[in-house]
Image (cartoon, helix red, strand yellow):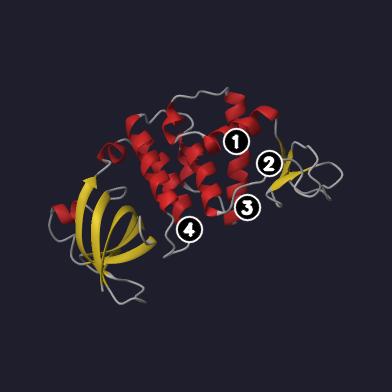
Amino acid sequence: MLKRTEGIVLKTIPFGEADLIVTYLTYDFGLIKAFAKSPRKTKSRFGSSLEPLTYSAISFWGKEDANLPRLTQSDIILSFKLIRERLDCFLKASEIIELTVNLLPEHEANKKIFTLLLDILHTVENDCNALLTVIMYKIKFLDLAGYAPRLEGCARCGKSGFSFYVSHGAILCENCATGTDSHVKLSQGSIRLYESLRKWDNSLAGRIKPSGNLFAELSGMINDHIRYTLSKPLKSGAFY
């Protein structure tokens, strides 16, 4: 069965001498892998369309239950070449991609996450130095994927609290907190910033500049939450 959709290349794995296994986030089918025949043999537009981050209109062929359909066509819509040409930009995009690949299940469409990723890649390309780009993606992605931390008061009794317990993925008040679980103290400002980033339009990532302390506090909490959820840290984030 031939299927058509739009997809963003998240990663590629060499297969044999000239073939590739390409991981896409697609608009209609979610996270998929496809087999690309001989794109590494010659420099061609087809091969260029398989560069990481490239956004293309794609067609692939395979049975309904096929784990690895064959990619039959790939036409570039946006290459995001400028991101790949700057190391700092590419590292930011790599952290976003790593989170997406590790947390999304395959073959489950999530059009809001696809649109979010596309918007954030536009922001990275247009303003690589925007402070909030990556953390905004993390917050919105976790929310849309069903892994959001709970910061609206104590998760057990509903009372106000400011200690985020990583093992619970939530704030707990002093009465409900147990033992010596690892926790992060949050200020009202960082909780408000979290809620704002979750709701704001993606285009605002490059316009808002919170204080360094506020950013560090919220970023640390989100990274701890992701590390616990994945049972490992994001490798890309260690390089910038």
In space, the residues marked 3 and 4 are separated at their CA atoms by 16 Å
Location of residue 2 by image quarter: bottom left
In space, the residues marked 1 and 4 are separated at their CA atoms by 23 Å
Residue at position x 79%, y 50% from top? Answer: 156
Is 39 left or right of 55, judged from the image as shown? left
User: In this rendering, which labeled residue sits more in front, label 1 or label 3?
Assistant: 1
Q: Considering the numbered disc 3 on the image, is that residue within a helix, a strand or a loop?
A: helix
- Front residue (pair 10, 59): 59
Q: Is residue 87 among the parts visible in the rendering? A: no
Residue at position x 59%, y 31% from top? Answer: 193
* Residues under numbered marks 2 and 1 in contact, where contact means CB atoms less than 8 Å apart: yes
Q: Is residue 236 above or below residue 102?
A: above
Kind of residue at disc 4: Leu
Question: For the residue carrying disc 1, how many other residues have a C-alpha within 10 Å: few (<14), some (14-19), or many (20+)?
Answer: some
Kind of residue at disc 2: Leu
* Residues under numbered marks 2 and 3 in contact, where contact means CB atoms less than 8 Å apart: no
Q: Which disc number belongs to residue 24?
A: none
Question: Mark 1 or 3 closer to N-term?
Answer: 1
User: In this rendering, which labeled residue sits more in front, label 2 or label 4?
Assistant: 2
Residue 129 on image: x %, y % = 41, 28
In space, the residues marked 2 and 3 are separated at their CA atoms by 16 Å
Q: Where is mark 3, residue-wise?
A: 228
Q: Which disc number belongs to residue 195?
A: 1
User: In this rendering, which labeled residue sits more in front, label 2 or label 3?
Assistant: 2
